[in-house]
Amino acid sequence: MGWIIALIVGGVAGWLASMVMNRDASMGILWNIIVGCVGSVIGNLVANQFGIAGSVKEFSLTGLLVAVVGAVILLAIVNLIQRGRVR
């Protein structure tokens, strides 16, 4: 059951990150889920360095925030590679 919640939270996190990074028109729901799930891994790695624990397996606001921050970092890296600058 935890992986279903992780996919839902990942999709929401990816959608929010694409809205923040102004890439919503170029991404579909599948890419939002992928970006959110990969972003949650990145966010957990970054957050653990600062002592913040957040997981998307059990829904929590902290886990969602960590996933969104990680997804924004991922989209910033993608923008940097594609365009040579962060929007």
Image (cartoon, rainbow, N blue to C red):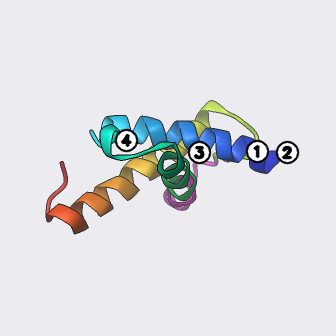
Q: CA distance from mark 2 to mark 1?
A: 5 Å
Calculate the distance from the C-alpha at mark 3 to the C-alpha at mark 4: 12 Å
- Labelled disc at residue 18: 4
State left or right for residue 87 relative to residue 4: left
Q: Secondary structure at mark 3?
A: helix
Question: Which residue has dot 3 on it?
Answer: 10
Is the residue under label 1 in contact with that under label 3 (CB below 8 Å)?
no
Packing grade of label 4 (10 A; few <14, some 14-19, many >=20) is many
Q: Name the residue located 55 percent from the left edge and 36 percent from the top edge.
A: 12
Tell me, yes or no, whether the highlighted magenta stretch contains residue 47. yes
Question: Dot 1, crowdedness within 10 Å: few (<14), some or many (≥20)?
Answer: few
Q: Mark 2 and 4 residues: CB-CB less than 8 Å, in contact?
A: no
Q: Position of residue 60 (x, y in %)?
A: 67, 33
Q: CA distance from mark 3 to mark 2?
A: 14 Å
The answer to if 75 sits in the magenta stretch is: no
The amino acid type, in three-letter code, at marker 1 is: Ile
From mark 2 to mark 4, how far is it between C-alphas? Answer: 26 Å
As helix, strand or loop, the secondary structure at mark 4 comes to helix
Instruction: State the extent of the magenta-drawn residues as a range.
Output: 40-53
Specify the quadrant that holds the N terminus. Answer: top right
Residue 68 percent location from the top left of the image:
47, 42
Disc 3 crowd rating (10 Å Cα; few below 14, some 14-19, many 20+) is many
Residue under label 1, please give it.
4
Give the amino acid at mark 3: Gly
| Horizontal and vertical percent position of residue 39 | 50, 54
Taking depth in this image into account, of 52 and 77 the one nearest to the observer is: 77
Sequence order check, earlier mark of 2 and 4: 2
Residue type at numbered disc 2: Met
Of the numbered discs 4 and 1, the one sitting upstream in the chain is 1
Q: Which mark is residue 1?
A: 2
The reply to whether dot 2 and dot 1 touch (C-beta < 8 Å) is yes
